[in-house]
Image (cartoon, grey):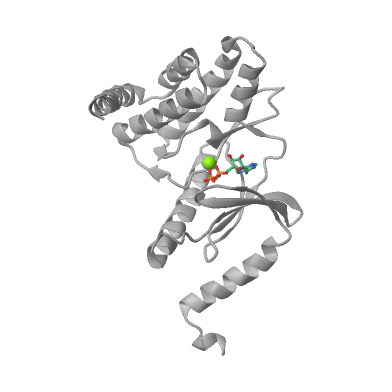
Amino acid sequence: MTTETLQQDDLASLAKLRVKDFLQHFQMVKQGAESKIYKGNFLGKPTIVKERFPKAYRHSALDKKLSHRRTAQEVRSILRCRKAGIATPVVYFVDYNASCIYLEDLVGALTVRDYIASVQKSKQDTGTLFPLAERIGQILAKMHDEDVIHGDLTTSNMMIRQPEKELRLVLIDFGLSFISALPEDKGVDLYVLEKAFLSSHPNTESVFKVFLNSYSNTSKKSAPVIKKLDVVRQRGRKRSMVG
Ligand SMILES: Nc1ncnc2c1ncn2[C@@H]1O[C@H](COP(=O)(O)OP(=O)(O)O)[C@@H](O)[C@H]1O
Ligand SMILES: [Mg+2]
């Protein structure tokens, strides 16, 4: 069969086969519900490959569309953040056919989730976490001022580089992100983080307060966002009372 007679779908399958060959040199290090994470070398650089694999439970055309959209959103928001000076991994290469993003491997970094867990495990004072909360507030305020809504704010989607020195925070996992200037979308983003934060890390209400204060002091548009956060919280409370 010549290339001319190949259909678009065949080309995509061929590309996937080639990617599979290529990824053989990479090591799978994580598998989530939506994606697989591989580590390896790409053009001589330590690289993470995030592959959105096909989901059998989804109709294949819909699955392809969703994977493509999330890959595109992830790349778009990473670039938008980087332009605004918000640290995110460098995008080395995007393979839309195979829904793979090749990203800078943040070697030696750990997730904020693991960092907080280790601080809590070693029974350090909760106040130890305030500088980190302050920094997260500044960065998310900057991100929202750029109208980037992350869509999946959790402490697993933030990484710390060299935690022993200055706090260098890097945001990751923008697959559910979108662009919006609406205070409601930003408020929901913060609400998702609040829920994730307090359920992942017990007794951190004071840490989250430091975060919110820092967010409010940094963002030029925080007042209506915090108002919306309160509305969403109330809605959440009512729902949990009914449920
Ligand atoms: N650029 C990166 N450098 C180092 N580790 C990463 C990088 N990107 C992701 N990871 C690791 O892989 C995990 C999953 O990646 P993520 O982008 O959050 O995908 P998922 O959608 O599966 O949550 C992260 O929590 C982090 O531990
Ligand atoms: Mg994630």
Task: Using the image, determine if residue 52 lies above or below residue 240.
Answer: below
Task: Using the image, determine if residue 221 lies above or below residue 91.
Answer: above
For the point 40% across and 19% down, the residue is: 216
Q: Nearer the viewer, residue 171 or 38?
A: 38
- Compared across the picture, whether 228 is left or right of 70 comes to left
Residue 85 visible in rendering: no
Quadrant placement of the N terminus = bottom right
For the point 55% across and 34% down, the residue is: 156
Task: Using the image, determine if residue 34 lies above or below residue 137.
Answer: below
Q: Residue furthest bottom?
A: 1
For the point 39% across and 67% down, the residue is: 61
Q: Residue furthest right?
A: 44
Question: Which quadrant of the structure image shows residue 234?
Answer: top left
Residue 207 visible in rendering: yes
Q: Nearer the viewer, residue 194 or 8?
A: 194
Question: Which quadrant of the structure image shows residue 183?
Answer: top left
Residue 102 image point, x, y percent: 62, 54
Residue 72 image point, x, y percent: 47, 55
